[in-house]
Image (cartoon, rainbow, N blue to C red):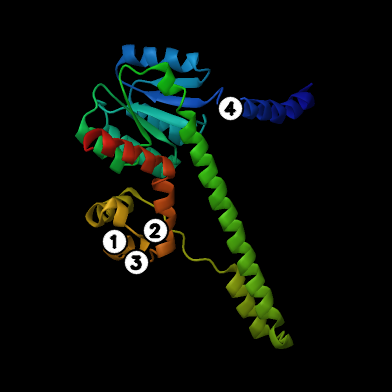
Amino acid sequence: MAAMGGDQRPMMEGAAEDKFPDGLRVLAVDDDCVCLKVLDNLLHGCKYDPTTVTDAKTAVKILRSGKEKFDVVITDVRMQDMDSFKLLELIRLEMDLPVIMLSEDCDKKAVTVGINHGACDYLVKPVHTNELKNIWQHVERKRKSEAIRHISGDDDDDQRAQLGTAGKSNDGANTDENKQNTLASTTQKKPKVGWTIELHTKFMEAINQIGLYRATPKKILEMMNVDLLTRQNVSSHLQVYFRPSFFIFHMFVFHLFIV
């Protein structure tokens, strides 16, 4: 029976995937117990799988433990135990999850700060079912973005392998020196840059100074002036942090407050 259960688990996961967005795993964070209960009921009504917590620190502990997997996080803007924008920044940097901000009013300053910290959406209380039914789109965009980056990475590996093969066969040279050079060119990797809170803060400051729509990886890199940081590092972080959903949301806010 145990073996049968092991065989059935992948099938069950595959079946759940086919029913997407049913079972969407949502972490909801709000220190207002009444609002949180209402949100929990609405999420269940959308056939999602919500987990609710009343403080930001508990939310961070749950996410960092990795015991439960989530697709998206919904958090209230005003939290007592932690700055909600700090929470937003931590989640985006450490877990790379779509984060939706929740507020009692559509405050322009709060919306702008949320955008700058990477929020993918901004909902105003009371939240309606139709709004929650659309949050799966942020998860789908994230999946497609990851798939594109994965394919690009495979292409880069293939190119490096081809260059290594060409170098190895050039003039039929098979000396130890050539082998070592070929091995170095195909296996040597640049030091991986870890995007800490401090480094990300410099990244955001550079974008704010340059301007969102004029901020290119080259300009950001020059403005940040950090050792070992490359234009490719900046470009990758730019793609991760500012996905298409971010720009759609940004244009929505632009028209909401300015036009």
Label 2 SS: helix
Q: Are marks 1 and 2 in contact (CB under 8 Å)?
A: yes
Looking at the picture, how far across and down is residue 214, in whole percent? 30, 57
In the image, which is nearer the foreground, mark 3 or mark 2? 2
Which residue extends farthest front? 259
Alpha carbon of mark 1 to alpha carbon of mark 2: how far?
Answer: 10 Å
Residue behind mark 4: 20
Looking at the picture, how far across and down is residue 217, in whole percent? 37, 60
Looking at the picture, how far across and down is residue 238, in whole percent? 39, 52
Residue behind mark 3: 227
Alpha carbon of mark 3 to alpha carbon of mark 4: how far?
Answer: 43 Å
Label 4 SS: loop
Alpha carbon of mark 3 to alpha carbon of mark 2: how far?
Answer: 13 Å
Label 3 SS: loop
Alpha carbon of mark 1 to alpha carbon of mark 4: how far?
Answer: 40 Å
Q: Residues within 10 Å of mark 1 (few under 14, many from 20)?
A: some
Q: Residue at x 51, y 46 (%)?
A: 145
Q: Earlier in the sequence, mark 1 or mark 4?
A: 4
Q: Are marks 4 and 2 in contact (CB under 8 Å)?
A: no
Q: Is residue 77 above or below residue 208?
A: above
Residue 58 shown left or right of residue 161 in the figure: left
Alpha carbon of mark 1 to alpha carbon of mark 3: how far?
Answer: 9 Å
Residue behind mark 2: 234
Q: Amino acid at mark 1?
A: Met
Q: Residues within 10 Å of mark 3 (few under 14, many from 20)?
A: few
Which of these two is toward me, 26 or 54? 26
